Image (cartoon, helix red, strand yellow):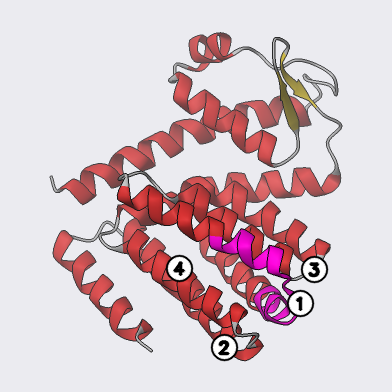
């Protein structure tokens, strides 16, 4: 088995188990077993009950926290918040994405949202916003140098761009879409050269924002979204190493300026 296939299979297996924990807790929330203010079962209890690892439990809790359904309090534990309609809707999207049903649809929506936000960022970004975006690029680059997954820096980049747009609704929508998809999008990092290509895309987007060129920024973001979507499809298709390499070469050729 190739390194790519092994990494992909391990990621999918972990996601499947994590989604089982997530779905179990969501069912308890929706059927009223858990009420706002209640503490969720502990990691130890969920591990014993569901037969999964602590890592899977922690990632499911992080997903619920990102969706603003729970808060994690030191020495208290994980506490259920008052679920809003929007939070439950986003939770359903996350559950669908975890089962590989809606990822393409959600990534298409990100393309629509983020091309608009980056255009606004090119018009409205302050010097502080530019510094914040540049910092995420440095963190991304540092993660690659240390052979760590750069996904958090990737998310932070897109949030920083959304912040620079000065549109709080746009930023809220982006965060609600991007964070729940973190596990699925991490699969793309299993594809050779995908993280490095993402960094190059970020640099192009940042350059366009710095130049105050909304059209160029929009084009750069659209290309980045298309690259990310294509990498995701390659990662999720079970292609051979040579097919993956061919796909990457096609992406690199398409993205040359």
Q: Is residue 134 visible?
A: yes
> Which badge, 1 or 4, comes first in the chain's sequence?
1
Instruction: Give the distance between the C-alpha atoms of the residues marked 3 and 4, in whole angstroms.
Output: 26 Å
Instruction: Give the distance between the C-alpha atoms of the residues marked 3 and 2, in whole angstroms.
Output: 19 Å
Instruction: Give the distance between the C-alpha atoms of the residues marked 4 and 2, in whole angstroms.
Output: 20 Å
Q: Is residue 130 magenta?
A: yes
Task: Answer with left or right where residue 156 lies relative to residue 164.
Answer: left
Q: Which residues are magenta?
A: 116-134
Q: Of circles 3 and 4, which is in front?
A: 3
Measured as percent of width and height from the top left, residue 37 is found at 85, 19
On residue 229, which mark appears?
A: 4
Instruction: Give the distance between the C-alpha atoms of the residues marked 3 and 1, in whole angstroms.
Output: 7 Å
Q: Is residue 100 visible?
A: no
Write down the residue under mark 2: 216
Instruction: Give the distance between the C-alpha atoms of the residues marked 2 and 1, in whole angstroms.
Output: 15 Å
Instruction: Give the distance between the C-alpha atoms of the residues marked 1 and 4, in whole angstroms.
Output: 28 Å
User: Which of the pair 249/21 is nearer the observer?
Assistant: 249
Q: For the N terminus, which image quadrant?
A: top left
């Amino acid at each position: 088995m190739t390194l790519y296939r092994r990494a992909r299979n391990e990621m999918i297996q972990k996601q499947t188990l994590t989604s089982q924990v997530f779905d179990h807790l969501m069912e308890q929330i929706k059927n009223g077993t858990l009420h706002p203010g209640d503490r969720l079962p502990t990691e130890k209890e969920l591990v014993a009950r569901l037969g999964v690892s602590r890592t899977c439990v922690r990632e499911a809790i992080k997903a619920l926290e990102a969706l603003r359904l729970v808060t994690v309090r030191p020495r208290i534990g994980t506490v259920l918040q008052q679920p809003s309609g929007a939070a439950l809707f986003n939770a359903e999207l996350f559950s669908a994405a975890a089962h590989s049903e809606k990822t393409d649809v959600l990534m298409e929506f990100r393309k629509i949202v983020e091309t608009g936000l980056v255009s606004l960022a090119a018009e409205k970004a302050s010097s502080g916003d530019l510094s914040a975006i540049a910092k995420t690029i440095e963190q991304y680059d540092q993660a690659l140098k240390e052979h760590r997954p750069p996904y958090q820096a990737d998310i932070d980049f897109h949030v920083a761009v959304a912040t620079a747009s000065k549109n709080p609704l746009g930023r809220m929508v982006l965060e609600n879409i991007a964070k729940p998809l973190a596990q699925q999008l991490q699969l793309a990092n299993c594809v050779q050269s995908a993280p490095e290509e993402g960094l190059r895309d970020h640099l192009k987007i940042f350059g366009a924002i710095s130049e105050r060129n909304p059209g160029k920024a929009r084009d750069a973001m659209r290309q980045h979204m298309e690259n990310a979507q294509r990498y995701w499809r390659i990662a999720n298709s079970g292609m051979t190493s040579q097919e993956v390499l061919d796909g990457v070469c096609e992406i690199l050729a398409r993205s040359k300026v």
